[in-house]
Image (tube, rainbow, N blue to C red):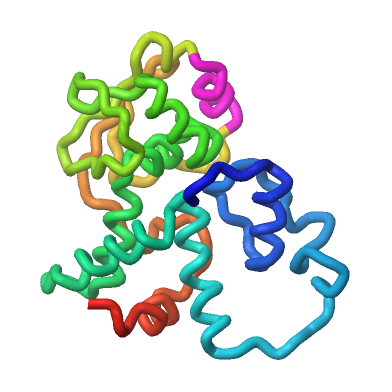
Amino acid sequence: MAKSTTGRARFKIQRALGLELPGLGKAGALERRPYGPGVHGNKRKKISDYAVRLKEKQKLVYHYGLRESQLVTYVKKAKKNKTRAWMDTLIITLESRLNNVLFRLNWAPSVPAASQMIAHGQVLVNGKKVDKSSYLVQVGDVITLSDKGYNNQLYKQSLETPRLPSVPACFTVEGTDKQKATLSAEALPADIPFEYNGQLVTEYYWKVK
């Protein structure tokens, strides 16, 4: 997302998609109104094939906090990798973004909150400060926080009440209050914490080269 969104806007996004996206933060977007926003949100209407594919793509945009141009760039790079299906490469790349890594470690309550911690210089990779949310964490990288980061209330609250039930097996985590994490293996596409149809995303971007 080019701009941060309020909690209310994030709920609207999730209702429009008909799916809770953990990366947007607090759960419960669909509890009161499990349908799209607006007076016509609960009425059934015919959806075009294009709209169905667009909806799947939008899940990735909003969950990972991306701009459309960023996602297209990732798609182009993924298609150049011939070692696996490009959709799998895309998901592994998105899961490797530093802001997502912090979120998946339950060090931040949402991807936007993780981005804020990174922008404030509270995140270290291999002992060096990294201030770009888009930084791609590599296998073997060690992620820690600065003293200010470990004292951040968002970090402490996230450890006490994690947004996600568990940390993916690709991470090795040490410590209790001041945790240290190592990316010990590539993320698995199956680890993505929400339902999505990769085939529809593939069809949406079939012309991108």
Q: For this view, does 204 lie left or right of residue 156?
A: left
- Residue extending farthest to the right is 39
Taking the spot 47% from the left edge, 30% from the top edge, the residue there is 116
State which quarter of the image contains the C terminus.
Answer: bottom left
Asked if residue 153 is among those painted magenta in the image, a careful observer would answer yes
Front one among 108 and 166: 108
Q: For this view, does 174 lie left or right of residue 139?
A: right
Residue numbers of the magenta segment: 152-161
Does residue 37 sit above or below 55 in this rendering?
A: above
Residue 47 figure quarter:
bottom right
Taking the spot 63% from the left edge, 67% from the top edge, the residue there is 17
Taking the spot 35% from the left edge, 78% from the top edge, the residue there is 205
Does residue 113 sit above or below 179 in this rendering?
A: below
Residue 96, given in percent of the width and then of the height, sits at 29, 47
Residue 176, given in percent of the width and then of the height, sits at 42, 18
Q: For this view, does 47 lie left or right of residue 93?
A: right
Taking the spot 31% from the left edge, 35% from the top edge, the residue there is 132
How many numbered marks are there? 0
